[in-house]
Amino acid sequence: MSDSEDFILSELLSVERRMNRGEAADDSAPPTRRDLSAEVREILLENRQCVHFLDKIRDLMEHSTEADSDLPVPRMIGRFRVKSKLGMGGYGIVFLANDEVTGRDVAIKIPRPDVMMSDPRLRRFRNEARTAAQLDHANILPVFESDNEGAVPFIVMPYIAGGNLASWRDAQRGEISPRDAAVIVLQLARGMAHAHSRGVLHRDIKPANVLLEPVAEQNAHRLPFTPRLTDFGLAKLDNGDQNLTRTDSTLGTTSYMAPEQALGNTRNISARSDIFSLCVILYELLSGKHPFRGEVSLETINNITQADPAPTRRFRRNVPVDLQAICLKGLEKNPDRRYRTADDLVEDLERFQSGKTVHARPAGWMRRCAKWSQRHPLLALTTFLTLIIGADRTHFWDIEHEEELMSFPAPVHLNASATYHDLSRRLSGPSALSSDGRQLALLVDGVVEIIDLKTPSE
């Protein structure tokens, strides 16, 4: 990265930090570095103007959010009698309601007012109902029906009283056993595999989109709940609306995006992108840490696309090596190095549960060196050249001192019992190997010492 690019990134990070603290970005001070090109100056000035505009939008959105939170609760939505408001997300408001026909409690989602005014966002809301209606799996929250109340669409779903995975994770305070973490992610992976088999990519898998359905008794997995994947608003159908695909290309939740999704590479988003997001969840459950989260979203995206996550065992030594290998395989930057399908991830998690050898293997030292070299190409090249030059110097040093060694008085012979410390101290000086490779001559304090390299059997 050039100095100019470094400076631009530094400026952008600084602006985002100020905005995250709720401070207004100052667009009055232009960049003053004289070494910046006119093009770079223009980029920074345009950025400052953009940020100034976003400051105004942020104020409007804050008032809009406050207004949304005070929206009156409707008495009826279709045949459903509304009891209370459960919450509000990025696209919809969810109510607890009672079906007057069946008598059961349900959750009903309607679009937020600002979504109703945006055609692309309204399409995404309708997309959730259309997509979820194609799926039928124990670990996916179903859609009972969808309809319209006048011009307002609504979606009817089961009411889940157990909260979501994000809240449960935080309440555990880092005391989640690796076995429970594997069970949770295995069940979600099965649901994800079902969705993929129907041509549906979720594209926004995160703990907040996993609802926990309480069970009367602990199930066979010892968990008091069944995790169910929900919120298919950003889902992509393989043969779906291409316009929806284009407008959605970089949407999702930054912290859980795959590298190709964070970079906006629409064509590269695949089932392996969902696998990456699910393995971010696994990493959090295992380590109590997020593998990539930075102070600001730009830093998070940089970590997702450039930085390798620390091994989970660095934070918790009780994480099994095989489970760590499964998690890190799913978090590979290169999609080709991740699990090929969700079914492959399911298979490896089942093998771990049954005590069988898993297919995921820890990265060997050569793979780690290669990845390090890709991240630090200049430093890797310098190190490589240093090693080559060092080896070359050693070779010529040995040849150069061969005659010098032979000119000294009769050598002292050392037996094979010389300690490692003695040998390492002696090997720091000039040395020469005999032509048959059986003896090593060393120059130590003006005395030639001969080390016999014969094996005991000889």
Image: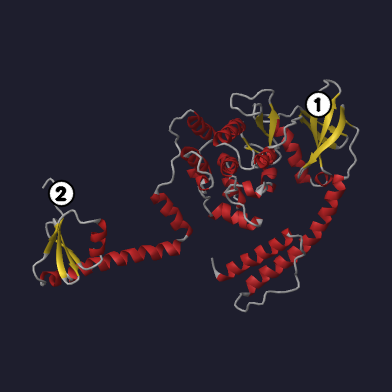
* Dot 1 amino acid type: Asp
The label on residue 232 is none
Q: Residue at x 72, y 58 (%)?
A: 20
Mark 2 residue crowding within 10 angstroms, few (<14) / some (14–19) / many (20+): few
Name the secondary structure under disc 2.
loop
Determine which residue is flagged by label 2: 455
Mark 1 sits on what residue? Answer: 105
Is residue 232 something one can see in this rendering? yes
Please tell me whether residue 106 is drawn above or below residue 306 in the rendered image: above
Q: 379 or 245: nearer the eye? A: 379
Label 1 and label 2: CA atoms lie apart by 82 Å
Residue that lies at the very extreme toward the bottom in this rendered image: 34
First in sequence, mark 1 or 2: give its number. 1
Is residue 18 left or right of 200 when viewed as pictured?
A: right
Give above or below for 43 relative to 87. below
- Image coords of residue 256 (percent x, y): 62, 46
At 44% from the left and 57% from the top, the residue drawn is 373
131 in relation to 407, above or below:
above
Q: Give percent across and percent down for residue 420.
A: 25, 56
The answer to whether residue 44 is left or right of residue 440 is right
- In the image, residue 285 lies at what x, y percent? 59, 41
Callout 1: 10 Å neighbours few (<14), some, many (20+)? some
Point out the residue furthest to the top here.
102
Secondary structure, mark 1, is strand
- The amino acid beneath tag 2 is Thr
Decide which of 458, 127 is in the foreground and name it: 458
1 or 2: mark nearer the eye: 2
Quarter of the image with the N terminus in it: bottom right
Answer yes or no: is residue 241 visible: no
